[in-house]
Image (cartoon, grey):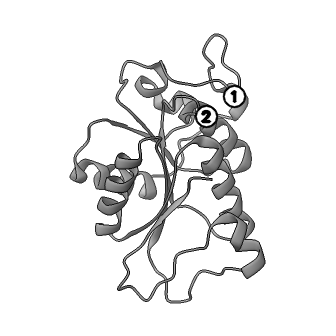
Amino acid sequence: MNVTEFSDPDSALVPPPRSAERASEGWKRPASWNGKWVLLMDDDQTVRHVAAIILESGGYRVLATADGREAVAEYRCMLGEGGAFDAVLLDLSVPGGMGGRDTIRQLLAIDPRVKAVVVSGSTYDPAFERFADFGFCAALAKPYSGEDLLRIVGSAITAPRPRGHVSPLEIPARSGDTMSDNTGP
């Protein structure tokens, strides 16, 4: 698994251990923790790193994954331990991996309250143009500024789920899409 945890080394808050370690160690969120958790999924390591730094500078705790399968596994772990991610950022296109379109389907099946933002450089994609139809609560175009990233994440966290949110079965699929297909253009 290619999961990266970002945290301020000077902070007294302890980030959660990786999935494999969580069950055995019985990780619990520290009682003093009052921030928000963001799950960040992007196949580009540099984007993950920079976005995590920006999000942490805004007071968020970040868990970053390289593809949708890892994101879904981390989301399940957090829920299984009684926690929750306050926002999820999903890269729409992940070459050779599960992208945002299939990931949001699985996340909605696990938790219909998920607040996910679709992130893409392909703003012409229907999942970006009509993000709410695909189960996302917002869209963020690449390249983005740190200010835009923090604004969109803050808005996603505070916004209620759209009325009549879409169920995973109602999400439009591309012709030939399967849960294992690459969702990129």
Q: Residues within 10 Å of mark 2 (few under 14, many from 20)?
A: many
Percent from the top left, x then y, of residue 157?
45, 57
Residue shown at 22% from the left, 53% from the top: 147
Above or below — where is 138 with respect to 184? Answer: below
Q: Are marks 1 and 2 in contact (CB under 8 Å)?
A: yes
Please name whichever residue, 116 or 11, is drawn nearer the observer in this view of the structure. Answer: 11
Percent from the top left, x then y, of residue 94?
51, 32
* Disc 1 residue type (three-letter): Ser
Please name whichever residue, 27 or 117, is drawn nearer the observer in this view of the structure. Answer: 27
Above or below — where is 80 with respect to 150? Answer: below
* Residue that numbered label 2 is attached to: 98
Percent from the top left, x then y, of residue 145?
22, 46
Residue 165 visible, this orientation:
no
Percent from the top left, x then y, of residue 144?
26, 41
Q: CA distance from mark 1 to mark 2?
A: 6 Å
Residue shown at 61% from the left, 73% from the top: 17
